Image: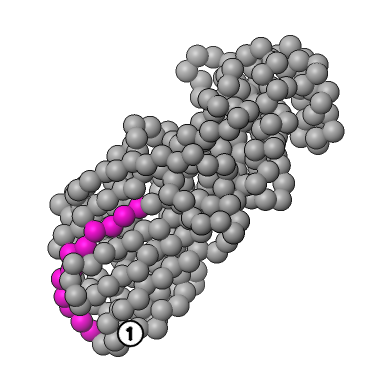
Amino acid sequence: MNIRVNNNTRTGGQIVAPDDPVPPVDLEEYFSVVTFETTKTEAPPFSEVKVSWAIESKDDKTQFEDFEFRLNGPPLFTLDEIPADGEHSFTIHYTTFLQLQGRQSGSPWMPLGPRLTVSIDDTECQVVGWDNRTVDAIVYTELKKFISDIAELRLRGKSEPSSDWNADRIRYYFPLELVTPEFPNADMDVWMDVEFQLVHDKDGVDIELVLDFETNVIYSMNEIMITGGIAAKVASLVEDIMPMVLECPKRQIQNRFKNDLIDVPAVKNGLKTGEFYDIRIVTQGRGWIEILICKPPTEPGDSSEEVVT
């Protein structure tokens, strides 16, 4: 990797594109998958999740720390040992690891899902203007393609596109096993969204990298999907709601289920006893719970959903 560094003051958090557009860079010649490992964990839902993107240098000239992003807090981005002020050019060979971790508040971090290992060899790009934490569009394009390549691996065999995502949005899927006495067959799924945004201002167009690692616990039983964010209340929520859900044949709303949830604002209107719905109970962060009830597609092949509540 040929890196040109102007200075060593690292602040800010944007990826800035030059005025002239840069054509897409085909990174297949740069990136190659070396190993792909999977891990399993038996643990309750987590109150915090982080992703570490570690870069191990094979060149003594440069050593990178983890690129770390945390759920329920501002992104953390650490990058040390950048050469001093001035221009430098050198080549490094390094390996990246993508690892999702979770923990209960105050407990040690635990690995979740697979650890992805990618080797990067002699990649050519430029890193410019570390005073504003900015790089040129070549680096942005390479990073975007790199993330896309990882998503295309369809981690552990499953990937799910969505029509409402823009072309720069990718969702990773990490299936886990969540073992609880109440629901021994429940699965815990972790999703990570990566989004790139174009930010227009008076000085031109900035390309801002948004790393939004959204995590959900998904319980699928009797065709009912209950989705909850990684939070301490998820287990008790499922414990309270699941018996009612299991009494509903398929996705049919019965009087008891409707009456038990009648005090929830989202459920006061729109439900009709005897009709079929998709039920999703969602916790966002640690503060509130949202209940979404959507009518399933009315025609085969129709992927649209009508949100009832």
Q: Is residue 184 visible?
A: yes
* Residue 53 located left or right of residue 86: right
- Say above or below: 188 vs 277: below
Residue 110 percent coordinates (x, y): 46, 51
Q: Foreground residue, 183 or 98?
A: 183
> In which quadrant of the rendered view does residue 55 lie?
bottom left
Q: Name the one closer to the observer, 234 or 169.
A: 234
Is residue 137 toward the left or the right of residue 183 in the image? Answer: left
In the displayed structure, does residue 208 sit left or right of residue 223? left
Residue tagged by mark 1? 7
Q: Tell me the SS state at disc 1.
A: loop
Q: Which residue is at 49% across, 39% downward? A: 42
Residue type at tag 1: Asn
Whether residue 148 appears in magenta in the rendering, the answer is no
Figure quadrant of the C terminus: top right
Q: Residue at x 41, y 43 (%)?
A: 113
Q: What is the quadrant of residue 67 in the picture?
A: bottom left
Q: Please state which of residues 43 and 159 is positioned toward the viewer in this rendering.
A: 43
